[in-house]
Image (spheres, grey):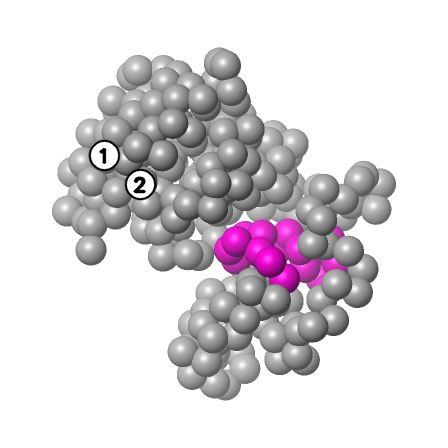
Amino acid sequence: MTIRVLIADDQMMVREGFSVLLGAMPDIEVVGEAVNGRDAVERVRELAPDVVLMDIRMPEMNGIEATREIVAADGAAKVLVLTTFDLDEYVYQALRAGASGFLLKDASARQLADGVRVVAAGEALLAPSVTRRLITEFSKLSESPRLMPAAQPGSYGELTERETEVLVLIAQGLSNGEIAERLVVAESTIKTHVSRVLVKLGLRDRTQAAVFAYEARLVRPG
């Protein structure tokens, strides 16, 4: 199955470069480009891409706001945020807005393509270079307001013991296969648990599930 990608960046050279890199992949098709956040939201409605490569700093509407609108529209598009700014606030805000992944723009062609594939498959993706700082940011949650309505103390009470266990492992960055190996069950069983966790908590994907687990204190940094 071909993965349909929309590239949103205000710099033409960046859009063209990503388009060439991804267009060379047999399983990826670049279906359109957007020059700012507002344009990205409109193009998603028109083109229904599977993945949106979203720059954070753009005119008219930034990538975080655009991500929030795209996710709120309840479409199938997954957002992979790309930025040259290796800053905690952007990582955290992007994930809170509903982004499924985060990569720096200096990622290699292989990393970019693999990132698109991972996000399209419903997995979470965080650039290794920002993971430690993201964990640090989570550790400061007690000092900042909680912005995800679902992440309230005790709101995970509907989860079974096994589903809670799976949620914790998701937050620790394990894939379905790794969780299945850890719990000694079939990977298909884990997929079922993950789906039920998302439905019960009203979350969009694994990335939001990871954010939820930290905010609900099911997982603690370090």
Q: Is residue 42 above or below residue 73?
A: above
SS at mark 1 in the image: strand
Question: Upstream in the sequence, badge 2 or badge 1?
Answer: 1
Q: Is residue 26 above or below residue 107?
A: below
Residue drawn at x 71%, y 66% as measured from the top left: 156
Q: Does residue 207 show up magenta in the picture?
A: yes
Separation of residues labelled 2 and 1 (CA atoms): 7 Å
Q: Report the disc number at residue 67.
A: none
Residue drawn at x 42%, y 83% as measured from the top left: 186
Q: Does residue 83 show up magenta in the picture?
A: no
In the picture, measured across the screen, residue 112 lies left or right of residue 165, that is left
In the picture, measured across the screen, residue 172 lies left or right of residue 43, that is right
Q: Which residues are magenta?
A: 201-219
- Tell me where residue 57 appears, x and y as whole percent: 51, 20
Q: Which residue is mark 2?
A: 49
| Quarter residue 36 falls in | top left
In the picture, measured across the screen, residue 117 lies left or right of residue 31, that is right
- How many discs appear? 2
> How packed is label 1: few (under 14 Cα within 10 Å), some, or many (20 or more)?
some
| Quarter residue 94 falls in | top right
> How packed is label 2: few (under 14 Cα within 10 Å), some, or many (20 or more)?
many
In depth, the one of 8 and 140 nearer the eye is 8
Q: Report the disc number at residue 31.
A: 1
Q: Amino acid at mark 2?
A: Pro
Q: Amino acid at mark 1?
A: Val
Q: Is residue 220 visible?
A: no
| Quarter residue 43 falls in | top left
Asked if the residue at tag 1 contacts the one at tag 2, i.e. Cβ–Cβ closer than 8 Å, the answer is: yes
Q: In the current view of this chain or complex, which residue is farthest to the right? A: 143
Residue drawn at x 58%, y 46% as measured from the top left: 131
Residue drawn at x 23%, y 34% as measured from the top left: 31
